[in-house]
Image: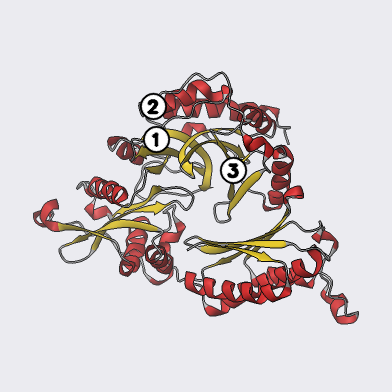
Amino acid sequence: MEAHLLLEARLPMVGSATDFTYKWCVNMGLHQTEAARMALAVDEILTDIVLYAFGDDTGHAEIWYQYTFSEVEIIIQEKGEPFDPGRYLYSAEKAIMEGDFEGASFECVRKMSDHFLFLNRGKDGKEFRLVKKFPSIDIREGFPVQPQVAVDEAESDEDNYYLLTPVTSEDAEDIAKLIYRSYGYTYSKEDLYYPRRIEMAIRHEYKFGTIVRTVSGGPAGYFAVVKSTDSRIGEVGEAVVSPQHRNRGLMKRMLNKLIIMSRQRGLIGLFGEALTVHAYSQKVNAKFGFKSTALILAKSPKRLFKGMETESADIITAIIDFLPLTRRWQAPEYLPESYRELLSDIYGQFNLTTRKATGPKKSESKKKATDLNLTIYYEKNSAVIVVRDFGSTFEASFTRMLRSIGELNLSSVYVDLPLNGYRIDSAISWLKEKNFIFAGLMPLFHRETDYLRLQRIEADIDFEKTLTISPISTRIKEVIKHEYDAIQKEQPKA
């Protein structure tokens, strides 16, 4: 249900865009009052663009509408004349005493949205980002944690006692209760504590899954695939089995069902983010043919996992495990020099061989404009920058983007580089100078194309608490630790 508008920067178009914004926000699940606030914020920005960005010239504005389980985000871009919002600060005192309302427009936008960010992208124009969170009910506030009761062994035959069915939006509250009663406040997927978010995600087909119920109808387990919005792959990222129903093979039965469902829906790959605070999820993934391809540091803030012997490190780190669902997947013709051997071995797990090309093929990309896509995960305090095309202004454009998000003080920034891209070696060398280190291979992650992920981490990592079980994941960890430690040694001591 994402949307994209390309508008001519004329006043008659503002009203149409405002109306569309309101209706889209309502359809995504925002309350009418909150939708009206977002529509007003978009109206303010578009009006300023029309009045001030292009002068007497004809210009255009583009709007992207994006949905996640916890929020909606609206991104507005234009390439009008530059301006510095820091020079136009709103003062309530000046407005009252002098009738000077300079900066009032941005102040209004900030009040109407939960997050507002302005990015100056230089030759790539200006970007305005507005976020509104869903004000949904948290299951933790309405339901006490109930004591777990052991299942009667006489009734627990898995073939007769449990029923697996596809999830529907009507299962949302039971899923949230299952998460809360199994993990308390400790589950890493925050959205699963909000029944409304679960309901909307299932209804809009952003995810699909299976739920396990007992013969009496009570929920015993849940497992879902979250579909990527950027490629035909999905994440096996939401899983729970109630403590009194564990060790009965339910997780394996559900994952097997999800793989079948994924193929039926035309997905070409599945990936899981296996937490490194314990080995269980890594072992389950391995049994179903998943192979490790990356290690993502500082994935989310600290969590404590109920019922597990090992507490988490200060932050959550995850292994990317991947399962291809198509035989047409092929390794790229060229791998970057810096990580060629390791990437070759990662591909080798899937019986994919890499060719020994002498260098990346030159393409038309060097003649195109730099194309960077930014996604900010506010709750996780992280961001991902996807390089669609390097272009000739890659370094300058990337630097401006980093500067623009600097005020957010993110603990982690990840950058995905296309492995079929020209200039990837020089880009890697330059990014390393900016303290980016290796993360790994992200197979088919963007537009059915393989990407190399690098990461810049502004957090302390305890690698002794980062558990890896496969030879490849251990090698990936060693490479990352070596590069991470090298940067830490270069940092000035406080």
What is the x, y in percent for residue 287?
28, 36
Give the residue pinned by disc 2. 352
As drawn, is 341 to the left or to the right of 292? right
Give the residue pinned by disc 1. 329
As drawn, is 141 to the left or to the right of 244? right
As drawn, is 185 to the left or to the right of 132? left
**Residue extending farthest right:** 98
Element assignment for label 3:
strand
Q: Quadrant of the C terminus?
A: top right
Q: Nearer the viewer, residue 34 or 335?
A: 335
For marks 2 and 3, give the CA distance. 24 Å
Contact flag, marks 1 and 2 (Cβ < 8 Å): yes
Contact flag, marks 2 and 3 (Cβ < 8 Å): no
What is the x, y in percent for residue 307?
34, 48
Q: Earlier in the sequence, mark 3 or mark 1?
A: 1
**At label 3, which amino acid type do we have?**
Arg
Element assignment for label 2:
loop
User: At x 37% / y 30%, what residue is drawn?
Assistant: 469
Contact flag, marks 3 and 1 (Cβ < 8 Å): no
Q: Which mark is residue 40?
A: none
Give the residue pinned by disc 3. 388
Q: Relative to 96, does residue 111 appear above or below in the rendering?
A: above
- Mark 2, Cα crowd under 10 Å, few <14 / some 14-19 / many 20+, is some
Q: Nearer the viewer, residue 412 or 17?
A: 17
What is the x, y in percent for residue 159?
12, 52
User: At x 54% / y 24%, what residue is drawn?
Assistant: 339
**At label 1, which amino acid type do we have?**
Trp
User: At x 63% / y 46%, what residue is drawn?
Assistant: 372
As drawn, is 60 to the left or to the right of 386? right
- Mark 1, Cα crowd under 10 Å, few <14 / some 14-19 / many 20+, is some
Question: Is residue 467 something one can see in this rendering?
Answer: no
